Image (cartoon, grey):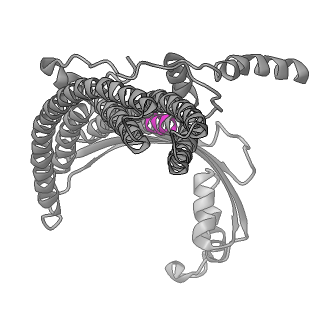
Amino acid sequence: MIIKKSLILLLLMLPLVANTNNLTLKQAIKILKKNNLELKISKFNEQMRAYETAEAKSHNYGKADISLTGMRSNDAGNVFGFKLQSREATFGDFGFAEFNSQNPNILNVQPSALNYPDAQNYYQTKLSYMLPLYTGGKLAEYGRITKSMERMSQYDTQKILNAKIFQTKKAFYDISLIENYIYNLSKMIKNIRHLENIIGNMKKEGYAQEIDKLEVQARLAEAQSMYNQASLNKDLAYQFLSFLLNVEVQSIHKVSEMAPMPRVNFDALESNNLDIQKAKLGVEITQMAVGVEEANYLPTVGAFGEYASADNTLWNEFTDKDSYTVGVQVKWNLFNGGADEANLEKAKVNRLKVQNQLLLAKSGVALQVKKLETEILSKNADVKSYKKQLRFAKKVYENYSARYKEGIASITDVLIKQSKELEILLKLLSVKNTRNTKIFELNSILNIGGK
């Protein structure tokens, strides 16, 4: 049976392990939703909030207790009380047996049976139930508050999910950009080595100098160092992606270097943005908190009932010696030094504060969206510009490389032009990275991170 369960578990895990090679972004997000540890912790918080909601709701149904008491005492008051509750009291317990008709001062007699009774056993089984009938709306408001806090925890989980999707997408696009950079560096290293061979051949024929060869070798060492650094950055990006997904990622399916621009609908922004939704819920909660404080000015009504049976022997003649008590209690606080008024005013001020925070969230989110849109459009223009500059820089490098072969350009000129090409390539990849980051940030604000 254990082996069978282990095989089933292994089969369930196989798709995740298999997908870590040539992993697609869609697969990664699916694994993220299932495996990410921060998401799991946040979902545990959701479950705890749900239990708090259930606990708050339970107060509406009252409370039932059953108790079993066992005692033995020779205290006069206790013994007499035990006998009364057990319905076993007799006139003899009052000391009537000690009255002497020849003694005219009967009232002065101190009955030994009453004052010095024998020790008595006492066992009582009691079922009690208390039910709140009216609390001025306090219990209802508490229930609504805990339910709203449960919803707030769900918003928090969604925010964490959006943030993790943001990081996952960025990791995919970063890896793709780094691989592009590594690919171009490989081509440059290949060109430098080709140039090194040309210099070697030209030196044999007396057309190149030793300094040319040393300069190219220095440039080659620099390019190889940059290549090694880029490879380390790629490994680091894979380690971060593996951390996010809580599973080792071997390779990914490359994505486009330019993330798609989302469509912004300002009319739907208010209903989609999580910060605004949390602020709205906060306003609702503060309104409920005002209701809780207002309930302190109203009476509370509760009902209670008890059913019990007592005897000197456990559960002896239970129904013959049973008893019941029912009642209703009304409690109304008339004065507590002004604390209720202070707490009510404090709740009202807090409500006003949160209402203004909602207005700030609405205007702030709208401004942030417009700012990101403008920055993304600016980066789009930069990408177009750097692409043109890169095409030109490549042509210039090729031109100077041909000139060097013809002896009309120095090796320094050739390497300078190659450095310029690499510089523009780095700027292009950097702009693409910045643009993608802003798009993922915009997706999170619009709450479309997982779409």
Task: Tell me what residue is drawn at x 19 percent, y 49 percent.
Answer: 293
Placement of 331 over or under 186, stated as above or below? below
Magenta segment's dominant SS is: helix
Task: Tell me what residue is drawn at x 60 percent, y 67 percent.
Answer: 78
Placement of 90 over or under 327, stated as above or below? below
Res. 77 visible in picture: yes
Q: Nearer the viewer, residue 184 or 433?
A: 184
Q: How many marks?
A: 0
Q: Nearer the viewer, residue 73 or 10?
A: 10
- Quarter of the image holding residue 335? bottom left
Task: Tell me what residue is drawn at x 37 percent, y 41 percent.
Answer: 413
Q: x and y percent of residue 130 in the render?
A: 43, 41
- Quarter of the image holding residue 318? top right
Res. 147 visible in picture: no
Give the magenta range: 42-50
- Quarter of the image holding residue 16? top right
Task: Tell me what residue is drawn at x 14 percent, y 68 percent.
Answer: 337
Relative side of 128 to 314, left or right: left
Q: Nearer the viewer, residue 284 or 298?
A: 284
Q: x and y percent of residue 288 in the render?
A: 21, 39
Q: x and y percent of residue 115 in the render?
A: 62, 76
Relative side of 90 to 55, left or right: right
- Is-magenta flag for residue 43? yes
Placement of 249 over or under 293, stated as above or below? above
Q: x and y percent of residue 451 in the render?
A: 37, 16
- Is-magenta flag for residue 370? no
| Quadrant in which the N terminus appears | top right
Relative side of 2 to 229, left or right: right
Placement of 388 over or under 66, stated as above or below? above
Q: Nearer the viewer, residue 277 or 313?
A: 277
